Amino acid sequence: MIVKGNLVDCTKEGTIRIRENNFLVIEDGIISKIYSQDELPDSLKNEEIEDYGDSLILPGLIDMHLHAPQFAFRGLGMDMELLDWLNTYTFPEEAKYKDIEYAKKAYKKFVDALAKSYSTRAIVFATLHTDSTILLMDMLEESGLKCFVGKVNMDRNSTDELIETTESSIDSTVKWLDICKDRYKNIKPIITPRFIPSCSDELMKALGNIRGDTYGLQSHLSENPKEVEWVKELCPDSDGYLDAYNKRGNLNKSKVDTVMAHCVYSDDKEIELLKEKNVYVAHCPQSNICLSSGIAPIRKFLDNGIKVGLGSDIAAGYSLNILNQAVEAIGLSKLYWRYIDKNSKSLELAEAFAIATRIPGSYFGKVGAFEEGFEADMLVINDEELNKDIDDIRKRFERFLYLSDECSLRAKYVSGQKTVTF
Ligand code: GUN
Ligand code: FE
C-alpha cells in the first residue's frame, strides 16, 4: 500500500518534522520506505496510491490512561477532589458493570467514540468485573484499535457493591489472564491494581508475582495531597508512594513496562525511582485541573529522561481528544513556571506533540512516528475549513493542534489497516 500526503511527525530528537507531498510505502502494516515526490521509483508509480492531496497526515495519538466505565458520566461531577469524587460518583457507576447488559450498552458508546477519536492506541482501565472486562476487550478488538486493557483489582476501602476479597481478586485475575490467552490480535491484558488505598499488601504482592516478567502494570501515583498522606499512613514501611509499589514487588523487571498516571506530587526521590524502574508517566492535565489535583512537574520528568505520555483520564478528564490534553499540558506548564518555579521552562509545541505520539508510542513498540520499521498508524486530517487561508504547513499544524475540534478525520489507520471510515 502507498499513502501520499503532507507528513507531520516528531523526530527522535523531539523536533517537528514536515515532509510535503511524501509517499509512505507500507508492507504488512509496517512503513518500509518513505519517498519525496522526486524520489518515487518508476516501479512504484503504477501501484495504487491512496492520494490524500494537500491533507496533513499525522501519526495516531496515544491515550496512555483512561477509564472505559467512566465514559458514561464524563462532564459530570467536577465539584470534588479525588477521594470524595471516587466515593460519590465513580464507585457507584463502576458497580453497574456487574450487569453485563448495562456494560454492553455503555461500552459500545465508549468504543464507538474512541474509534472515531484521534487516538489509535490506548491504555485502559476497565472495572473489577471479569466478564464485562472481557466484553470490553472483545469490542475493542473488533474496532481495530490497539489497546492494553486492565481488569481492576480492589479489595479494600471501597463500597459494598464494588469490592473483591483478596482471594477472589487474585483468582479472578488469573482466570481473566487465562481467558485472554490467544484470544486477541490487537488487545493485551495489563495488571491493574487501582491504587494503593484500594489494594491490601497481600493482594499487591500477589499481583507482582502474577505480573512476573510477562505483563505490564498500570496504576495511579501521587495524584492528590490527601491521597498521598493516606498512602503514608497505609504503608509506614515505605519511603514514598512509588516505593510502596516497589516494596510490594509491583515494579519488578518485566518485558512490558509500568505506567503510572498523574505523578503530580512526585518529589526528587520519587523521580529517581521512576527513572530507575523505567516507569512511563501518564500526564493527565485536564483531570488534574478538574479534580483540583495540581500541576505535575513535567519539565523535571523530561529533563530526567523519564518517558511521559498524555492521558484523557476519562471521566476525571472530560475529553477523549488527546490534542486537547496536549494544549492543556502546555498551559499548565506555563502556570508552573509562573507560580511554582521560574526556572522551569514551559513546554514547547514540539514537546507537547512528542508526548502525544512518539514517546508513549514506544510503549507499544515502534509506534508514533513516520520512519522505516515503524507501524503505520496514520491520521488523515481535514483542516480545510479552519486553515483555508494558510499555506504554511507548520502553521496549519500548529493551528490544528489547538483547534482540532474544528477539524475532522478523513481516514484513520492502525498498523496500516483502515479503521472507521468517515
Ligand atoms: N485513583 C484511583 N482511582 C482513580 C480513578 O478512577 N480516577 C482518578 N483520576 N484517580 C484515581
Ligand atoms: Fe485515572
Image: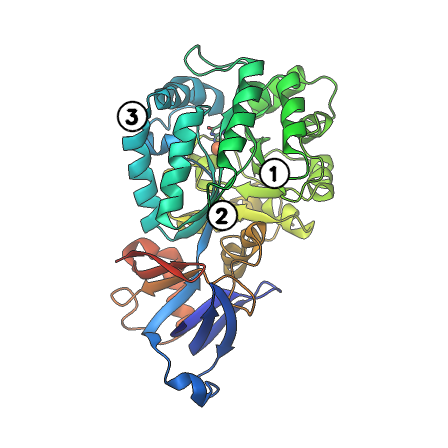
| Circle 2 residue | 329
Between label 3 and label 2, give the one nearer the viewer: 3
Answer few, some or many: residues within 10 Å of disc 3's Cα (few below 14, many 20 plus, some between 14 and 19).
Answer: few
Q: Callout 3: helix, strand or loop?
A: helix
Name the N-terminal-most of marks 2 and 1: 1
Colouring scheme, one of rainbow, by chain, secondary structure, one colour: rainbow
> Residue 235 is drawn in which quadrant?
top right
Left or right: 206 as drawn, with respect to 238: left
Separation (CA) of disc 1 from disc 3: 29 Å
Percent x, y of residue 77: 35, 26
Separation (CA) of disc 2 from disc 1: 29 Å
Quarter of the figure with the N terminus = bottom left
Name the N-terminal-most of marks 3 and 2: 3
Residue 315 seen by the camera? no
Q: Which mark is residue 274?
A: none
| Circle 1 residue | 215
Q: Amino acid at mark 1?
A: Tyr
| Circle 3 residue | 102
Percent x, y of residue 250: 67, 30
Callout 2 touching callout 1 (CB < 8 Å): no
Percent x, y of residue 300: 65, 46
Residue at 73% of width from left, 36% of height from top? 269
Q: Callout 2: helix, strand or loop?
A: helix
Q: Amino acid at mark 3?
A: Tyr
The answer to which of 198 and 28 lies nearer the viewer is 28
The answer to which of 304 and 422 lies nearer the viewer is 422
